[in-house]
């Protein structure tokens, strides 16, 4: 008895808490395919992503796609190995031998063996007979199986899905996609602060010329800093495995302070989650920028202690 074969089926459903756009991006990288073909997978109808797999291969595909956020299922592929040609636009169906004698006005479908009145299309399986025969002539058994997206715009993307996602995610600073760890979150925030200090200084200088112009410039810089900070916070939440919408908790009094502190304490997941692979290792620059926060904190503490003492001394001298 031959070993059971399996197929991976996808109906457009997502894993719990998975974001649609994030899943599409993950599948795009996984399949090495364009957005149009990936969008076709979310039509709502069942799509057989991969067929004729051994159980171990099917489990690998299942695991990789579920990590990417797609709620796929493994089913037994009963038709595997029964068809002569594995075409993309028509699932393999067992071929039936032609009867010994066929009336002159009838024909047998070369794909499914259905006997019918002569026609350009099979009434049972729906293939265009002339195109199917031409396809068989052009491709051998193995070539037809690998033809995939190159032969029909409606084919599902083909790739080595059993391969794992990239080891590390690609870093993108000004976006809400992707993941960053605690140290990189500190480093990017410090980098943003250092970059904005000269701009704030220029904006403050404009107050000497025009309070309106200076205030407008200061407001624009403040908005830019806030937007960038939100992007950094969302990526930090993604690293933990949380939705970026939770960043709204930082606006709640008291709760917001505790929540912001958690962003610096809770470590990210070491493996790929629904927002993608983990971020790359921290560079020396990241470590240096993050360490600057310690210097800022120490200077602030020293200033908070020394300044009142100096003011008291100065008052006593007067």
Image (cartoon, rainbow, N blue to C red):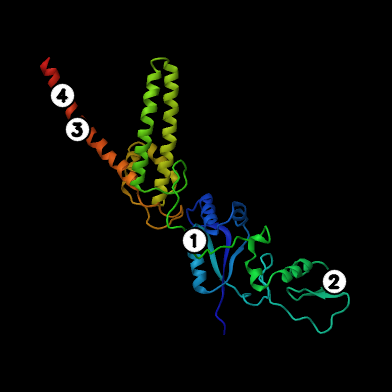
Question: Mark 3 or 2 closer to N-term?
Answer: 2
Q: Earlier in the sequence, mark 1 or mark 2?
A: 1
Which mark is on residue 298?
Answer: none
Q: Residues within 10 Å of mark 2 (few under 14, many from 20)?
A: some
Q: Which residue is mark 3?
A: 302
- N-terminal of the two: label 3 or label 4? 3
Q: Single out the residue that lies furthest toward the left.
A: 317
Q: Quadrant of the C terminus?
A: top left
Q: Is residue 262 visible?
A: no
Residue assigned mark 1 = 66
Q: Circle 2 is placed at which residue position?
A: 118
Above or below residue 222? Residue 80 is: below
Q: Are marks 1 and 3 in contact (CB under 8 Å)?
A: no
Q: CA distance from mark 4 to mark 1?
A: 62 Å
What is the crowding at mark 3: few (fewer than 14 residues within 10 Å), some, or many (at least 20)? Answer: few
Q: Secondary structure at mark 4?
A: helix
- Rounded to the nearest angstrom, the CA distance separating label 3 from label 2 is 94 Å
In front: mark 4 or mark 1?
4
The quadrant holding residue 202 is top left
Mark 1 or mark 3, which has the lower sequence index? 1
- Where residue 280 appears, as percent x and y from the top left, is 39, 52
Q: CA distance from mark 2 to mark 4?
A: 103 Å
């Amino acid at each position: 008895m031959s070993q059971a074969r399996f197929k991976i089926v996808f109906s457009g459903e997502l894993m719990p808490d998975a974001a649609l756009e994030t899943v599409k991006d993950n599948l795009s990288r996984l399949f090495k395919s364009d957005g149009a073909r990936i969008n076709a997978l979310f039509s709502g109808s069942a799509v057989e992503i991969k067929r004729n797999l051994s159980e171990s291969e099917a489990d690998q595909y299942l695991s990789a796609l579920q990590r990417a956020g797609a709620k796929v299922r493994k089913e037994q592929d009963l038709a595997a190995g029964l068809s002569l040609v594995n075409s993309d636009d028509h699932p393999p169906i067992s071929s039936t031998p032609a009867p010994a004698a066929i009336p002159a006005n009838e024909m047998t479908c070369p794909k499914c063996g259905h006997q019918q009145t002569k026609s350009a299309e099979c009434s049972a399986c729906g293939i265009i007979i002339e195109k199917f025969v031409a396809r068989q002539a052009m491709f051998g058994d193995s070539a037809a199986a690998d033809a995939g997206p190159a032969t029909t715009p409606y084919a599902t993307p083909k790739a080595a899905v059993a391969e794992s996602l990239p080891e590390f995610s690609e870093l993108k600073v000004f976006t809400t996609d992707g993941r960053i760890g605690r140290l990189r979150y500190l480093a990017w925030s410090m980098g943003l602060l250092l970059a904005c200090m000269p701009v704030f200084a220029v904006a403050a200088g404009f107050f000497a010329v025009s309070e309106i112009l200076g205030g407008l410039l200061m407001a624009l810089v403040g908005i830019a800093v806030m937007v960038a900070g939100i992007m950094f916070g969302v990526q930090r939440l993604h690293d933990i495995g949380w939705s970026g919408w939770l960043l709204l908790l930082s606006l709640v009094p008291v709760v917001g302070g505790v929540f912001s502190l958690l962003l610096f304490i809770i470590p990210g997941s070491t493996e790929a989650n629904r927002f993608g692979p983990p971020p790359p290792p921290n560079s020396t620059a990241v470590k240096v920028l993050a360490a600057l926060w310690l210097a800022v904190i120490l200077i602030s503490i020293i200033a908070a202690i020394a300044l009142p003492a100096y003011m008291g001394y100065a008052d006593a001298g007067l």
